[in-house]
Structures are given as structure tokens and as C-alpha cells.
Amino acid sequence: MAKIRKIMCCCGSGLGSSLMVQMNIEKALKNLGIEGVEADHTSLSEINVRSADLFVVGKDIAPRIKDYPRVVVLNKIMSMKELTEKLEQAFAIEGDEIHIAR
Amino acid sequence: MIQDLIKVENCVIVDGVEDWKQAIHLALEPLVKDGCCTDEYEQAVLKMTEDYGPYYVLTDHMALIHASSEAGVSKTQMACTILRNPVRFTEEKDKVLCLVALCAVDHSSHMDGIVAVSSIFGDEEKEQKILGSTSPQEIYDLFIENAEM
């Protein structure tokens, strides 16, 4: 599977927490020194498994995309610390499956 | 610009509310009065809460009351209500003291507002500051100060 080039954040409405997480991801990638990765946000009704290489969602949304191959689940949607740690883990995984929830 | 997204008149401090439904109504009231959205938007928030649960409770103390951009929204705008007594949206530990209401006509016009929300509520000290606001002007000023990335 391809390297992570695009990250999609998703929430119920597509304009609240998903946009917030998108901005936090951009900040976290910069802090981690990861370049060439795009982040975007969408709603649950428009989400598509082919639209990104990695999906980042809050735990309320997680059950709805449990079949997706690469998912990071956030317990605290606004925590930069949790997000940064989980992104670092995700980028360290070489395989096709990424499931980081805890 | 953040100045286009929030007004002093849309910042409110109240004692408390009876339940989460009244909290949603109160939070959206300034936006409805201002003509930014209609009652249909409130119904959409209630419907989405039934479908998904209170997805908008983003920290233990803050709820970002919003639905999607389709339902009865004519202008992107935010409002902020501080509660002196907390309201619960779930059985869990949340004790919501701040209701930020948002209606947006698309997926990006409210970007500066989200930057402010993220910066205020991602920082415990700033969160305490907004929760302790004693006037609408103080609430408004915090949004304006924190809209820069």
C-alpha cells in the first residue's frame, strides 16, 4: 500500500471537530518534521475509503468506519498530545493495516 | 475574519439551564434572532443528537453546538453562552459550562472561528479564563485574541 500522502478527518457534520482535527494534524506534522502530507476534512455522509491513505476520527465515529484499513481513533478530540503521539505511531507502521485506538 | 464570525451581542452569560435540550435552544437563540439560521437548524441539531449522540461535546466543559451546513442556514456565524451551573449531555463525566453555537454555509467559511475555539479550549488556562468571564465583552475579546494561528 502507498505511503501516507493524504489524511482525512471525519465527523458527523463535516464542519466542527473534523476541521479542528485537520488543523491540529497540520500543526502536528510540522512539529514531527513530516512533509508532503495533505490533510482534509469531511462528513460521515460523504466519507469514502479511497479518498485518503489514513483516516482520523473521534471515538464516536470510529464504529462507523471500522472496516477501513487505516484508522487513527482519538479519545480526546482536542488533545494535541494524543494526536501527535498517534500520528507518530501511524507513520512508523510500514504495513497495510493501521489501527490505532488506545 | 473573526470579526465577521462573532459579535458581542451573541456572547451571553446565564445562570444555568434545565437540560441539554434547553441548552441547545439557548445556545442557538442569538443566531436565530440574528437571522443566520432558522428553527429548522435547531431541529437538525436535535435530530443529529438522536442519531449520533452528543458529538459536539468536545471537552469536559465545552459543547460546539452545530449541525451540517444544509439545514436552514443563511449566514456563517457563531455565538457563545457561558453557564454558571453545568449541564450534562451524557451519562459520563462531562459538565458543560460553555456552549459555542455555530452555523456555517459551507465547510470552510468558519475557519477562523474554529481556530479560536481550538486555541481557547485546547489550553486549560484559556479555558478557565473564558469560563470565568464576567461580561460579554470579555468572551468576545477572547475569541478575537485567539483567532490567529
Image: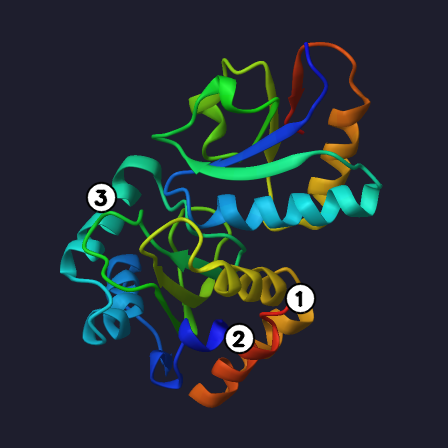
Q: Which mark is residue B7?
A: none
How many angstroms separate mark 2 from mark 1 (CA)? Answer: 15 Å
Mark 2 or 1, nearer chain start: 1
Numbered marks: total: 3
Q: Residue furthest right?
A: A33
Amino acid type assigned to the residue bearing label 1 in the image: Glu
Q: Residues within 10 Å of mark 2 (few under 14, many from 20)?
A: many
Query: Which residue is found at the position 54% from the left and 78% from the top?
Result: B144
Q: Nearer the viewer, residue B30 or B76?
A: B76
Query: Which residue is found at the position 71% from the left and 50% from the top?
Result: A27
Mark 3 or 1, nearer chain start: 3
**Labels 2 and 1 share a subunit:** yes
Considering the numbered disc 1 on the image, is that residue within a helix, a strand or a loop?
A: helix
Considering the numbered disc 2 on the image, is that residue within a helix, a strand or a loop?
A: helix
Where residue B28 sits in the image (x, y, percent)?
A: 27, 66
Q: Which mark is residue B143?
A: 2
Mark 3 or 2, closer to the camera: 2
Q: Nearer the viewer, residue B76 or B26?
A: B76
Residue beneath label 1, please?
Answer: B124
Which chain is indicated by disc 3? Answer: B
Amino acid type assigned to the residue bearing label 3 in the image: Lys
Position of residue A77 relative to residue B27, above or below, is above
Residue beneath label 3, please?
Answer: B47
Q: Residues within 10 Å of mark 3 (few under 14, many from 20)?
A: few
Amino acid type assigned to the residue bearing label 2 in the image: Phe
Check contact, mark 3 vs mark 2: CB within 8 A: no
Q: Residues within 10 Å of mark 1 (few under 14, many from 20)?
A: few
Which chain is indicated by disc 1? Answer: B
Q: Nearer the viewer, residue A4 or B146?
A: A4
Colouring style: rainbow
How many angstroms separate mark 3 from mark 2 (CA)? Answer: 29 Å
